[in-house]
Each structure stands twice: as structure tokens, then as C-alpha cells.
Image (tube, rainbow, N blue to C red):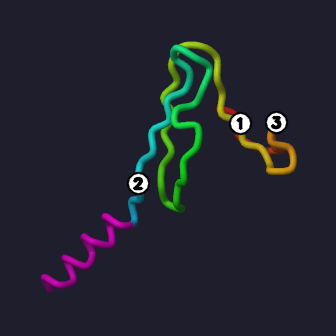
Amino acid sequence: MRNFALALALFAVGALGKEHMVMVGGDSLVYNPSCLAAEIGDKVIFQFMKNNHTVTQSTFEKPCVKMAGGKLH
């Protein structure tokens, strides 16, 4: 029974993934970090500072155009 509980706890920790914080705006109009490598299951958290920035879902073919049905935050 202890082995099952231990395996379940280790699975739950692994299933959560990592959290990546991205600072947006502030003293300059940039994302910091400007690039990151998130894995499936990871969370990317955007902290918006002063100035105007949005996060818009797009495609690789048209990265500057909002994807049809895409999200805008």
C-alpha cells in the first residue's frame, strides 16, 4: 500500500509540469525572457507591467495575424 501511495504522489508531482514566468512590458516594450522552452503540461504565466502588450494566438504561416477562432489576452 505504501508503494502505491508513493507512486501516486510521484506521478502527481510529475504531471503538474513546470511554471514559466514571462514579464511583459515594464521599462521597455519587451517580453522577458524573450524565448523559453515549455514542455507539454507546463504553464506559461504572463505578468503584464505598464505599457500595452497582448498575447494573441496565431499560426506559423501568419504569426502577426490573429488565428481564426484564436484567443486574444
Report the side of 32 relative to 65 (left or right): left
Which of the two discs, 1 and 3, sits closer to the camera? Answer: 3
Q: CA distance from mark 3 to mark 2?
A: 28 Å
Which comes sooner in the sequence, label 1 or label 2? 2
Give the amino acid at mark 2: Lys
- What range of the chain is rendered magenta? 1-14
Vertical placement of residue 53 versus 35, above or below:
above
Residue name at image x 51 percent, y 45 percent: 44
Q: Residues within 10 Å of mark 2 (few under 14, many from 20)?
A: some
Q: Read off the residue under disc 1.
A: 56
Residue 5 lies in the magenta stretch: yes
Q: Read off the residue under disc 2.
A: 18
Residue name at image x 49 percent, y 29 percent: 23
Q: Which mark is residue 21?
A: none
- Classify residue 50 by image quadrant: top right
Q: Read off the residue under disc 3.
A: 64
Give the amino acid at mark 1: Thr
Residue name at image x 45 percent, y 39 percent: 21
Residue name at image x 60 percent, y 25 percent: 30
Vertical placement of residue 62 versus 18, above or below:
above
